[in-house]
Image: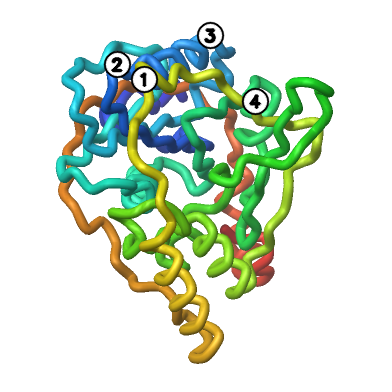
């Protein structure tokens, strides 16, 4: 059977060719969702070698706006959370990772975008395994590398789930879930790193009057919760300090778009070397 025939016989939802899953979420309670659509339109113009191997998981965190998901020339899974929980970033990110189609994932904020060279690097990069990466941003004035966005992480889906994902005890109120996510990973031996400075993340200009949210940022509720979790892991040790609350809401799949899968390069030598991967675990998946 020809390689092309093998690919054509796959299930319509087959995504084994995906090398990187791009996860972002939004809550828009103003005029429109242009902040999301304009980002995807930009990515539509990227080269096919990127678009063919990236899955975009878009999570609508129960926006009150009524809209129809337009068609995009991208691999997309568009999800809608159906319970209105304020500041449910923890839940939205957990849901996005559940629907990821690759072990390499990047958790993105809506006010950031990846240029082509960074995207291509992440698609072709090795598995992050126990490391999680931030990405330098470009200072708009000096054009030099500056501190990465606090909500952007490149990491392994398996590692994300090994440490229970985001703690949804923070959902419903603003703040602390990202901070505790990072601290929990570091306490359990995950290595925080940065991508090389030549691979950047770019800040986006979002219309915060028409295509954003108007939620209040108040840390007074979540700060004591965060302090308690710090005390728990400090006092009781391994795997304490996380509630295990996970997907504590309902959701639906709104839309799935799939590009035609590319024909893979043959690697007939790979499977017969199973014994090598068995003996030398560092070469196994």
Distance of label 4 from label 2 (alpha carbons): 23 Å
Q: Tell me the number on the disc at residue 45.
A: 3
Q: Residue, x 58% and y 13% (percent of image)?
A: 47
The earlier-in-sequence mark between 2 and 3 is 2
Can residue 192 be spotted in the picture? yes
Distance of label 2 from label 3 (alpha carbons): 22 Å
Which residue is the extreme one toward the top?
45
The earlier-in-sequence mark between 2 and 1 is 2
Pointer 4: residues within 10 angstroms few (<14), some, or many (20+)?
A: some
Q: Give 19 or 255, whichever is nearer the viewer.
A: 255
Q: Residue, x 42% and y 30% (percent of image)?
A: 56
Q: Nearer the viewer, mark 2 or mark 3?
A: 2
Q: Residue, x 53% and y 69% (percent of image)?
A: 184
Per the image, the residue denoted by label 2 is 32
Location of residue 154 in the rendering, given as x and y in whole percent from the top left corner: 59, 45
When the figure is inspected, residue 108 is found, relative to residue 218, above or below; the finding is: above
Can residue 260 be spotted in the picture? no
Q: Give 258 or 215, whichever is nearer the viewer.
A: 215
Distance of label 3 from label 1 (alpha carbons): 22 Å
């Amino acid at each position: 059977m020809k390689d092309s025939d093998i690919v054509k016989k796959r299930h319509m939802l087959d995504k084994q060719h995906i090398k990187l899953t791009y996860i972002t979420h939004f809550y828009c309670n103003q005029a429109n969702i242009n902040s999301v659509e304009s980002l995807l339109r930009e990515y539509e113009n990227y080269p096919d070698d990127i678009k063919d191997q990236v899955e975009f998981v878009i999570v609508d965190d129960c926006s009150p706006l009524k809209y129809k998901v337009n068609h995009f020339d991208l691999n997309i899974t568009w999800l809608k959370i159906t319970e209105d929980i304020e500041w449910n970033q923890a839940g939205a990110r957990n849901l996005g990772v559940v629907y990821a189609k690759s072990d390499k994932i990047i958790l993105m904020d809506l006010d950031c975008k990846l240029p082509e060279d960074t995207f291509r690097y992440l698609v072709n990069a090795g598995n992050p395994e126990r490391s999680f990466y931030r990405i330098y941003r470009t200072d708009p004035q000096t054009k030099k590398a500056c501190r990465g966005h606090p909500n952007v992480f490149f990491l392994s889906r398996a590692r994300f789930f090994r440490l229970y994902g985001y703690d949804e005890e923070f959902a419903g109120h603003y703040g602390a879930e990202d901070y505790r996510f990072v601290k929990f990973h570091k306490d359990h031996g995950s290595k925080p790193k940065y991508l090389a400075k030549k691979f950047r993340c770019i800040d986006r200009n979002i219309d915060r009057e028409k295509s954003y949210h108007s939620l209040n940022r108040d840390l007074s509720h979540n700060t004591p919760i965060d302090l308690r979790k710090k005390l728990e892991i400090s006092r009781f040790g391994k795997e304490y300090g996380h509630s295990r609350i996970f997907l504590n809401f309902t959701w639906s799949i709104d839309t799935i778009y799939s590009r035609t899968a590319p024909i893979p390069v043959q690697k007939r030598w790979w499977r017969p070397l199973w014994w090598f991967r068995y003996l030398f675990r560092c070469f196994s998946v």
